[in-house]
């Protein structure tokens, strides 16, 4: 199975490296010093819980030239880079290529479907705590490394099952679902809350959930996202908020959201596609989102990163 990883950050690097270690033919897309470090020393994954990996040699490119189409392309870039990613992978998307975004947010697949056709796109969700700690080096925290994916028509397709088998061979938990839209929103509920609160407090999830006031805000943000989803016609489990709070309680205390990390190092923030989307949809659907709106205002000065 030929797999391209479009974006070798925390998500793409961890899942791509574990697939490569299991014997799959994986090509990574990276740029700048990150790519240079991978070419020189390989792609390193540091994980106390899951075990370290070194993929060397590691096939890494900054662009595709005269490559045959891939079987699967994982899109794992930051949301503001989605359109650039589409043009980067366009030359290697063939008739039988499946494109799956494991990015954050709920709107990225609309862009992929418009670019490549709905039949080439599966919906995807990633669960992993990982960041780039230095060029060529990824630090993975916690034990969770899970991918959820499925067809938008609700079928269990042969391509989904073949990907599931490859992922499980690589010791990655893989779940194929029949309602990917609901699954995306279920992830979105916890993602918006965790990213907004950890970034606003400038702390990982441990201190945020341990403090009574910030814990209450976590729950209130999730309730707002559920209200917006329900008004949008999305079916969600009735106990979703309590279930997602239990999920957050089960995370290692030093696990953080990528947005908190991006704020800390001065990168751009995905805020407009996360809590910002909740606020925008709330206004459109006449759903009140006071906590999400306040957190967006707190983080807005940092959206474009350091100059």
Image (cartoon, rainbow, N blue to C red):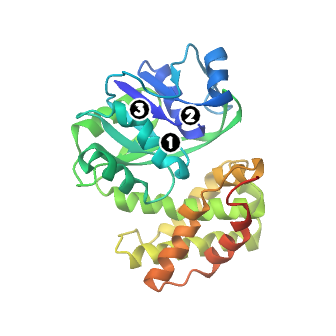
Secondary structure beneath disc 3?
Answer: helix
Q: Which residue is under mark 2?
A: 8
Q: Give me the residue at 66% from left, 15% from top.
A: 40
Determine if residue 43 is in view: no
Q: Residues within 10 Å of mark 3 (few under 14, many from 20)?
A: many
Image quadrant assignment for residue 272: bottom right
Q: Give me the residue at 22% from left, 42% from top.
A: 157
Q: Which mark is residue 76?
A: 1
Q: Position of residue 81 (x, y in %)?
A: 53, 47
Secondary structure beneath disc 2?
Answer: loop
Side of 161 where 11 appears, left or right: right
**184 above or below 233?**
above
Instruction: Name which of mark 1 and mark 2 comes first in the sequence.
Output: 2
Q: Which residue is under mark 3?
A: 167
Marks 1 & 2, CB-CB < 8 Å contact? yes
Q: CA distance from mark 1 to mark 2?
A: 7 Å
Side of 286 where 182 appears, left or right: left
User: Could you say which is closer to the camera, residue 82 or residue 273?
Assistant: 82
Side of 285 where 252 appears, left or right: right
Q: Give me the residue at 22% from left, 37% from top.
A: 158
> Of discs 1 and 3, which sits in the foreground?
1
User: Could you say which is closer to the camera, residue 46 or residue 121?
Assistant: 121
Q: CA distance from mark 1 to mark 3?
A: 16 Å
């Amino acid at each position: 199975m030929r797999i391209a990883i479009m974006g070798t950050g925390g998500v793409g690097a961890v899942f791509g490296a574990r697939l490569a270690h299991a014997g799959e033919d994986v090509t990574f897309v990276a740029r700048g010093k990150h790519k240079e470090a991978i070419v020189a020393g390989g792609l390193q994954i540091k994980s106390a819980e899951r075990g370290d990996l070194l993929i060397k040699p590691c096939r890494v490119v900054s662009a595709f030239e005269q490559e045959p189409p891939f079987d699967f392309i994982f899109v794992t870039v930051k949301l503001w880079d989605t359109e650039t990613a589409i043009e980067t992978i366009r030359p290697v998307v063939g008739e039988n290529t499946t494109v799956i975004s494991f990015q954050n947010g709920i709107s990225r697949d609309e862009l992929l479907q418009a670019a490549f056709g709905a039949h080439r796109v599966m919906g995807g969700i990633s669960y992993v705590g990982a960041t780039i700690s230095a060029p060529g080096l990824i630090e993975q925290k916690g034990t969770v490394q899970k991918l959820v994916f499925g067809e938008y028509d609700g079928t269990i397709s042969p391509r989904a099952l073949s990907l599931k088998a490859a992922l499980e061979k690589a010791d990655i938990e893989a779940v194929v679902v029949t309602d990917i839209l609901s699954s995306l929103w279920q992830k979105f509920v916890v993602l918006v809350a965790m990213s907004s609160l950890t970034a606003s407090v400038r702390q990982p999830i441990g201190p945020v959930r341990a403090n009574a006031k910030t814990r209450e805000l976590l729950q209130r943000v999730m309730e707002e996202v559920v209200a917006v989803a329900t008004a949008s016609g999305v079916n969600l489990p009735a106990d979703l908020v309590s279930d997602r709070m239990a999920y957050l309680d089960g995370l290692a205390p030093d696990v953080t959201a990528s947005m908190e990390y991006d704020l800390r190092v001065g990168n751009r923030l995905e805020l407009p596609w996360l809590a910002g989307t909740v606020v925008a949809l709330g206004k459109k659907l006449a759903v009140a989102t006071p906590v999400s709106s306040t957190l967006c205002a707190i983080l807005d000065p940092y959206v474009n990163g350091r100059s």
